[in-house]
Amino acid sequence: MFYEPKKKNHGLAHNPFNSLIVPRPIGWISSLGLDGVPNLAPYSFFNAVSYQPPTVMFSSGTAATEDGLKDSLRNIEDTKEFVCNMATWDWRNEMNESSKSVALAIDEIAMTGLTTIDSRLVSAPRLAEAPVNLECIYLKSVSVPGWSDADNFKIIIGEVIGVHIKDEFINQEGLVDIKALQPIGRLGGNDYAVVNAQSFFSLKRP
């Protein structure tokens, strides 16, 4: 089949685009508002973009708020800090729960029964339950104009200045044990994938 996204002429029950770039890693972003209220939200438009310095990005659409920003974006642009927490199989339900649209005054970390722990270099809290936390400082925002105001997205780019890895997820060879971590990724619609011993494989570069 062939279709043109702007014409929406795919003829399918749902837009297939979200099922075509998969699996997408999930940036489980924790931030802190100027009012001191923590925020937690998962973003599947998320990835690493460079090594030195280690840099990450995530992208968010608009929200039904006065400024049109989701809480994560507002917090990060205000405070210039955030944390990327790894979303894993063990915490898939809490990750999903934290995607709820709730009032600004609601602390999604407390709402989902998760635990905050102080970061070392930034004021934004990290998740005690997550096996990996990346402490980040804000570098810049990039606006991605949509076909309408409701389609506008904004990319947040941050430098990773601190990395936490729980010791039990580093193997005897001194490598991160991905199979033990069991990170999850977003597919299309309500579907997700998990990296585990059954799905893991290696290839040597030529």
Image (cartoon, rainbow, N blue to C red):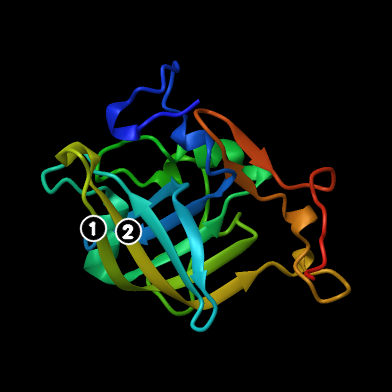
Q: Give the residue type at disc 2.
A: Ile
Q: Can you give x and y, in whole percent of width and height, for residue 153 in the image?
A: 27, 49
Residue at 32% across, 58% down: 155
Q: Residue at x 52, y 48 (%)?
A: 114
> How packed is label 1: few (under 14 Cα within 10 Å), some, or many (20 or more)?
few
Task: Please report contact status of discs 1 and 2: CB closer than 8 Å, yes or no.
Answer: yes
Question: Is the residue 88 above or below the residue 79 in the image?
Answer: above
Residue at the spot x=44%, y=79% of the render? 121
Residue 143 is labelled as 1
Residue 183 location, x and y as percent? 66, 50
Horizontal arrangement in the rendering, residue 185 relative to residue 119 (left or right): right
Q: Residues within 10 Å of mark 2 (few under 14, many from 20)?
A: some
**Left or right: 18 with respect to 199?**
left
The residue beneath circle 2 is: 155
Q: Residue at x 44, y 16 (%)?
A: 13
- State which quarter of the image contains the C terminus: bottom right
In the image, 46: left or right of 87?
A: left
Could you tell me which secondary element the residue under label 2 belongs to? strand
The type of residue carrying mark 1 is: Ser
Q: Quadrant of residue 79?
A: bottom left
Q: CA distance from mark 1 to mark 2?
A: 6 Å
Q: Nearer the viewer, residue 47 or 184?
A: 47
Mark 1 falls on what kind of element? strand
